Image (cartoon, rainbow, N blue to C red):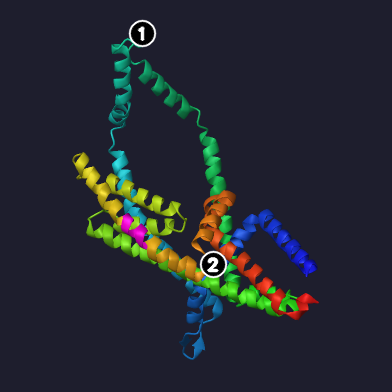
């Protein structure tokens, strides 16, 4: 038994090392598996549709599913276009000289206080001028060529990753069960039963988790959009969409969503006259996101995490922050699915050692 445990530990260590070394490829495969899981029901539905006693070819069904997904993303982009256009118009009308003067006014007041109290013998304007010179110097030292190179590098990496994900997802959908059958073919006969049990349980839990996330996003979008629309906040659908997507990031997502909502609400409300109006606008947005957050914490998250992946909330808290320390935001998002795979594998193998005679001989 110890020998088997040693072999399994060695295999897991090698797998983790390969995942770390080929992290980009592993990320592409994981994202492709997620997208394939989302699109597979649609592909099967289209593929089984009859036209003049002929089924739609599978490759054509996949392309049609891709078209539907592209259409959904296009609708998301369309929601943000009016907001971006509005923000550009607002920025074009800003009096930056007046804005700079207002921003430096507290510094001028503090400077006048120092001179009036004779805490300094310098001429008026010494703090303001120093601050302006520092800002000008910092801007002049920015290497715009490096920024451009970074943008080009990011763009090329993004499109390479996008092509890889599209390609991998296509073959996962076209060759139905290809990856699963390949994994099964590598399993020795004496480990077959316990391995199949673990694989089936992992697939079931991850499928439930994915469906739960989709339900969570839809619920947050619906609640936020309805609440913001009722309270008369502009671009309610756009704010709600951003909040739903940002909520995929555990703990930090709700803060990002509410902050984005406050910024958009304040910057697009040109009819606000005084401090009370601004405060009332912030209060309306915060109240909506408070309801969203309470619903998410009390109803959605226990339903999704505890029920779908059968993990205690304390475990979820620890593994999410462990993922954040290892890989930042992507690590937080991938922490629960990764932990589910490892946890189910260990539990099933442990039960296999207890139940199957082959492991004890």
Residue at mark 1: 121
**How would you classify the magenta stretch by its main secondary structure?**
helix
Q: Position of residue 211 (x, y in %)?
A: 47, 70
* Numbered circles on residues, count: 2
Q: Position of residue 32 (x, y in %)?
A: 57, 65
Query: Does the stretch in magenta take in 290?
Result: yes
Name the foreground residue: 348 vs 336.
Answer: 348
Q: Residue 168 vs residue 125: left or right? A: right
The disc, 1 or 2, on the residue closer to the chain's N-terminal end is: 2
Quadrant for residue 121, please give it.
Answer: top left
Query: Does the stretch in magenta take in 332?
Result: no
Number of the label disc, if any, that sits on residue 353 = none
Quadrant for residue 356, please give it.
Answer: bottom right
Residue name at image x 46 percent, y 87 percent: 51
Q: Position of residue 196 (x, y in %)?
A: 66, 78
Q: CA distance from mark 1 to mark 2?
A: 67 Å
Q: Residue 194 vs residue 172: left or right? A: right
Residue name at image x 32 percent, y 40 percent: 91
In this rendering, is residue 215 above or below 283? below
Q: Secondary structure at mark 2?
A: helix
Can you see residue 206? yes
Q: Nearer the viewer, mark 1 or mark 2?
A: 1
Image quarter (top left, top right, bottom left or bottom right) of the N terminus: bottom right
Name the foreground residue: 261 vs 310.
Answer: 310
- Magenta stretch: give its range: 289-295
Crowding at mark 1 (Cα within 10 Å: few <14, some 14-19, many 20+): few
Residue at mark 2: 34
Q: Position of residue 147 (x, y in %)?
A: 52, 39
Q: Are marks 1 and 2 in contact (CB under 8 Å)?
A: no
């Amino acid at each position: 038994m110890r020998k088997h445990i040693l072999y399994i530990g060695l295999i897991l260590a090698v797998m983790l090392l390969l995942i770390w070394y080929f992290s980009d490829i592993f990320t592409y495969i994981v994202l492709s598996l997620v997208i394939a899981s989302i699109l597979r029901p649609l592909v099967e539905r289209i593929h089984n549709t009859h036209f003049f006693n002929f089924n739609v070819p599978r490759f054509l069904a996949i392309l049609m599913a891709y078209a539907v997904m592209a259409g959904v993303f296009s609708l998301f982009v369309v929601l943000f276009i009016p907001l971006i256009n509005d923000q550009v118009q607002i920025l074009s009308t800003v009096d930056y000289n007046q804005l700079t003067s207002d921003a430096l006014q507290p510094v001028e007041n503090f400077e006048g206080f120092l001179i009036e109290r004779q805490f300094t013998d310098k001429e008026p304007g010494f703090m303001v001028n120093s601050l302006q010179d520092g800002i000008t110097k910092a801007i002049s030292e920015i290497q715009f060529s490096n920024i451009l190179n970074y943008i080009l590098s990011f763009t090329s990496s993004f499109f390479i990753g996008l092509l890889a994900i599209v390609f991998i997802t296509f073959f996962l959908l076209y060759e139905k069960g290809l990856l699963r059958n390949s994994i099964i073919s590598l399993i020795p006969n004496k480990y077959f039963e316990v391995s199949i049990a673990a694989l089936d349980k992992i697939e079931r839990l991850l499928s439930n988790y994915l469906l739960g996330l989709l339900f969570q996003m839809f619920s947050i979008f619906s609640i936020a959009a309805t609440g913001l629309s009722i309270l008369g906040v502009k671009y309610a659908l756009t704010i709600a969409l951003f909040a739903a997507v940002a909520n995929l990031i555990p703990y930090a997502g709700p803060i990002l969503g509410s902050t984005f909502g406050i910024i958009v609400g304040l910057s697009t409300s040109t009819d606000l006259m005084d401090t009370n109006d601004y405060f009332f606008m912030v209060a309306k947005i915060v109240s909506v996101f408070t309801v969203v957050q309470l619903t998410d914490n009390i109803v959605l998250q226990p339903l999704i995490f505890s029920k779908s992946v059968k993990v205690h909330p304390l475990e979820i808290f620890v593994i999410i922050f462990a993922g954040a320390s290892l890989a930042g935001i992507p690590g937080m998002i991938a922490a629960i699915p990764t932990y589910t795979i490892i946890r189910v594998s260990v539990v099933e193998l442990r039960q296999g050692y207890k139940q199957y005679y082959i492991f004890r001989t």
